[in-house]
Image: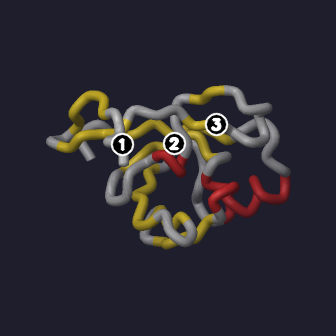
Amino acid sequence: MKRPKFGLHFGGRRRKRRRGKCPTCNGSSIEMTLKDVPVGCRARVVGFCPGLAAERLAYLQAYGLAPGYWVRVLQHSPVTVIEVEHTELALESELACEVLVMEDGGN
């Protein structure tokens, strides 16, 4: 089995260097999706993929997942579980790939 390539160190941890592929944005490269954030790390929501359905966007915003809010990733398998403002949310993998985030370097 090949070892993954690692990028820069953040907070004493090695972070895999990878770029997300958004299924609804015609496969265009984006900085990072919620699915790319390592378990236990925090990230700030910066937006959503343009192809995200209006009812799904309303669902996410109703639970506090909106641009500017901090989230902590609790798990990725079998679904992505995040914590937003003391609320835990379980998101399908496809939905987690449509949430654009910026990782907190200090955790």
Few, some or many C-alpha atoms within 10 Å of disc 1 (few <14, some 14-19, many ≥20)? few
**Front-lying residue, 5 or 54:** 5
Q: Say which of marks 3 and 1 sits in front.
A: 1
Residue of label 1: 2
For image coordinates 27% across by 47% down, the residue present is 107
In the depicted structure, whether residue 23 falls above or below residue 84 = above
Q: What separation in Å lies between label 1 and label 2 (alpha carbons)?
A: 37 Å
Q: Which mark is residue 68?
A: 2
Residue of label 3: 21
Tell me whether circle 2 and circle 3 mark residues in contact (CB < 8 Å): no
For image coordinates 68% across by 39% down, the residue present is 22
Label whose residue precedes the other's in the sequence (1 or 2) = 1
Q: Is residue 99 left or right of residue 6?
A: right
Name the residue type under label 2: Gly
Name the residue type under label 3: Lys
Q: Position of residue 44 (x, y in %)?
A: 46, 43
